[in-house]
Image (tube, rainbow, N blue to C red):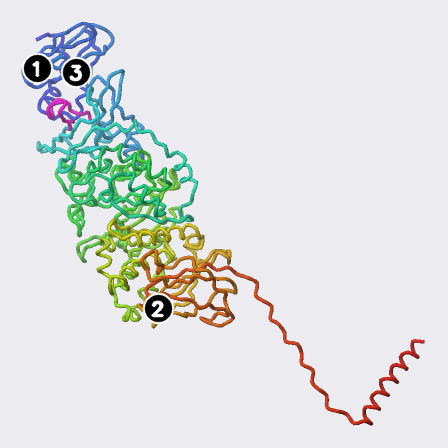
Amino acid sequence: MDENIYKYMDWPRIEGIVYGEEASPKDILAPRLTPDGVLIQGYFPEAQEAVVLAGRKKYPMELEDEAGYYAALIPGRKIPQYRFQIKRAGKTETFYDSYAFPGQITQEEEDAFCAGVYYHASQKLGAHPLTINGVEGTSFAVWAPNAMRVSVIGEFNDWDGRRNMMHRMPKSGIYELFVPGVKPGETYKYEIKLKNGEMRYKADPYAFCGEIPPADGSVVADLRSFVWTDQEWIKKRDKKDVKKEPVSILETSLTAWKDGEELAAFAKKLGYTHVELHPVMEYLKDEYSTSSYYAPTRRFGMPEDFQKLVDRLHCEEIGVILDWTPAQFPRNESGLEAFDGTPLYEIQDPAYAVHPMWGTMLYNYGSPMVKDFLIANAVYWIETYHVDGFRMDDVDSMLYLDYGRKPGEWLPNIYGTNENLDAVEFLKHLNSILKQHYPGIVLIAQEDGLWPELTDCVENDHLGFDFKWSGGWTKDFLSYLSNDPIERKNYHDQLTLSMLYAYSERYVLTLGSRDVGGYEDFLEKLPGDENQKKAQVREAYAYMTLHPGRKMSALFSDAEEGIRECIRDLNAMYKAYPALYEKDDEYDGFEWVQLMKYEENVITFLRKTDKPEETLLAICNFAAVPYEDYQVGVPFYGKYKEIFNSDHKKYGGGGAVNSRVKTSKKEECDERSYSIRVKLPSLGVSVFSCTPEEEPAVKKMPAVKKEAAPKQEGEASKEKKKKTTGKRTRSKKKE
């Protein structure tokens, strides 16, 4: 053994490397200058020989520990670029030394991560193909602060955790390592040695690509090469206030489409402003149990294929909203649960860590690093995939400590109430950051509780969502529709109740696949024969379009063309008439005309702006009988033109439409001075534009002269004489 080398050996820490218990191997294995030259060390299990290649020179390495620990002193005062050449199992391998390359995470970035404000954490954590000092490879980084040791493993090192042990950053517990030669497309995992000596094999929480399920490994991906063409879309999006724009969302799943071209063409043809995709993040079993938050599922291609899909939709001026699950994550061996052997991402108390209804794990929003993981994830999807917003699933389970729990199964907060204060602060933090940097995105909360003013801004100490998913409206409306029309008069409040709370939040109304199932499922829920069922589907979508609130609907692949044509015209009407969205969140944007016609199963209302000429009149008949001469009060004298009728023959209806413009008459109805009479189809909706005109002047009848009774001759002579005398007198006076 070379005595010069021996004196530089740190035997206790070398033993830690050999036994796989060293958390900071770079402290030992990084090359360093000594008075005797450059000390280079390496741990090569089962290697029979090791050599340092520096330039054209070879320097044999000395075996310092029989487990495979080698070292060499090479002359020089500067650390050269070098490679190792080793012989193992009859093969010769040549590679660069991972520990000779600097770490890629700065102290400032580590501090931001620990504070929960490193919003671009995905730029350093995960697997990043890089070129450092002319050497290509991949930089790996993962947060596992309570692990004894973490290694990155893959085909590139024969899945041997002894060969690429990662270096722990002392403050954060992030492990990082640059591994030369690892290229995009290579599969990897993290081998985590727990403090009790057990081994865990985990997928990368920040992986940008995964294996095709049921395999659960992570895959190195380079997402820098895609060329976007949607710059104008992004500029226009971030200049708009989504709360003042029409929003009609197609709720769908990638499984329903052959490719992005088909989806984009369909959404464009039917006039949707956005598509909302069921979670596209990788999952193993249930698409709402995200197993890899930063990776689009491989079921539909590679990550760049999803970039292409979003770009294509933007070219058709259609926004992309993702379903996102920041409330819980699934329990699987390679996932986030007990990631480093301790409750890291989940709530630390096991009594409260599991979702009481789904059996999934609940996030620990009290951890700045966990919050950073989720906020950085939202930022990642916006910046890397150009998505335009999120529908956050299961928000109520985040907000309430007693969600799904019985008395005695939960503990109140410090104020003695049931609000999850950590989750509240997380949502405020998340929404404020997203709106600050990407003002045009859409933030929708799926929250079925009664959290107050959920869509008010963070500046007012509220949660800052743009919209709330209106589960209550959907439930009541579908319940009403399920009743036979003869019985609906007894459930009229289910139809009208929503207007009592319509302005307490900004709502998104939904008639999607989660509400009604497939098209056949929807028909099955409705009473009547086949034609009546289809009429009610058209009526349901029409009523949703006219009701205050943004719109979300599912269009079923097996629905006939008439239904599609109906929804296309509804979307066109919705976008063309400001009354249907401009004052969607204001009381004076809506006015009842007929609220209590429950015996007839009819409701009538106005949608309005500040301009009377933009007023729309909507008449909805939920009875199975038509009305040939239905009278309804109107807001003013003028012309009333039918602009939509759900019973139109092109939709598959019976054709009970109003083809001629109606002029209002001064016939009092619904406590209004003017009214019109219209043809109202059964199980149908009719919409009229309202054009005010100057009221015609009331014509006065000419006065009728009364015929005087005949006078006596003497009296007539006297009268004539009197008039003549008067004239003479006036004439004389004038003279």
Q: Residues within 10 Å of mark 3 (few under 14, many from 20)?
A: some
Q: Nearer the viewer, mark 1 or mark 2?
A: 2
425 shown above or below 85: below
406 shown above or below 303: below
Residue identifier under label 2: 626
Three-letter code, disc 3: Phe
Q: Is residue 89 left or right of residue 294?
A: left
Q: Which mark is residue 91?
A: 1
Q: Nearer the viewer, residue 182 or 309?
A: 309
79 shown above or below 711: above
Q: Earlier in the sequence, mark 1 or mark 2?
A: 1
* Magenta part of the chain: 150-168
Q: Which mark is residue 95?
A: 3
Circle 1 SS class? strand
Residue at 29% over, 34% down: 307
565 inside magenta stretch: no
